[in-house]
Image: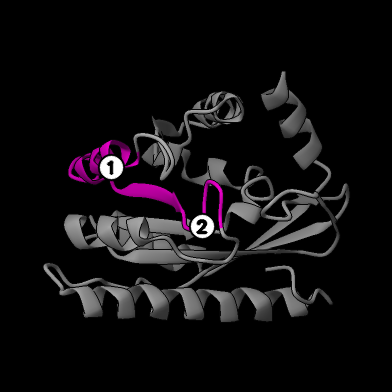
């Protein structure tokens, strides 16, 4: 029921993508990617992800009651949920995501999920990129109008007849076997870069301090 309601809902919303063709060409050339989005924007991206359904991306979803619903919705969108989170079976799920990238081209990582803090890139994103050799590709999702929920991530629900802009960043490679300081520098560098880009895109719609 949730899946079909969401499909109908997103028919009222206009979606524009930026740099999508470059990412598709990257994938068609046999390369892999780890896409990274903010937890705050996971609802807003649902109306867009079917464009990549032929690649059947994997996505880590928490082992919670809410996670059960989300996993079912994403399964119907041709995603392959891998259950686990930083709070529960995180290492096992992360290892499964890395292993999955050996045979599939796309993994999706919610970089500050599942419980935050909001806007903080978790180490799992860097570990996944380091161990798999796949680059991180940030996705920035901005929208003209939205409801803001009273949740830890201030989840954004795009309003009917609003506009959503999906912007793909350039792939960012993480070297293998890096030391602790280089690892933290990479994590902090990606976090700063992603926050600056997301906030810049939000300002184009008049938003301030969403994340």
The residue where tag 2 is placed is 112
Q: Is residue 47 above or below residue 119?
A: above
Q: Position of residue 193 (x, y in %)?
A: 49, 80
Q: Which label's residue is closer to the chain start, 1 or 2?
A: 1
Q: Nearer the viewer, residue 115 or 187?
A: 115
Q: Position of residue 124 (x, y in %)?
A: 34, 55
Q: Which residues are magenta?
A: 90-116
Secondary element at tag 2:
loop
The residue where tag 1 is placed is 91
Q: Nearer the viewer, residue 75 or 7?
A: 75
Q: Is residue 150 above or below residue 60?
A: below
Q: Position of residue 6 (x, y in %)?
A: 73, 33
Q: Is residue 103 magenta?
A: yes
Q: Is residue 184 above or below residue 77?
A: below
Left or right: 42, with 186 as reference point = right
Name of the residue lying farthest toward the top: 1
Q: Quadrant of residue 49?
A: top right
């Amino acid at each position: 029921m949730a899946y079909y309601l969401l499909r109908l809902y997103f028919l009222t919303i206009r979606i524009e993508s930026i740099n999508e063709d470059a990412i598709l060409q990257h994938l068609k050339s046999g390369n892999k990617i780890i896409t990274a989005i903010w937890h705050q924007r996971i609802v807003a991206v649902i109306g867009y992800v079917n464009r990549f359904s032929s690649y059947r991306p994997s996505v880590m979803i928490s082992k919670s009651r809410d996670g059960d619903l989300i996993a079912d919705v994403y399964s119907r969108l041709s995603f392959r949920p891998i259950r686990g989170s930083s709070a529960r079976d995180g290492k096992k799920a992360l290892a499964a995501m890395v292993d999955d990238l050996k045979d599939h081209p796309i993994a999706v990582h919610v970089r500050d999920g599942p419980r935050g803090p909001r806007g903080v890139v978790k180490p799992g994103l860097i570990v996944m990129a380091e161990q798999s050799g796949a680059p991180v590709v940030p996705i920035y999702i901005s929208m003209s109008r939205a409801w803001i929920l009273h949740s830890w991530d201030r989840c954004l629900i795009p309003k009917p007849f609003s506009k959503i802009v999906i912007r793909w960043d350039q792939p960012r490679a993480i070297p293998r076997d890096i030391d602790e300081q280089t690892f933290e520098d990479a994590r902090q560098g990606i976090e700063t870069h992603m926050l600056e880009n997301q906030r810049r895109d939000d300002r184009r719609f008049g938003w301030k301090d969403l994340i």
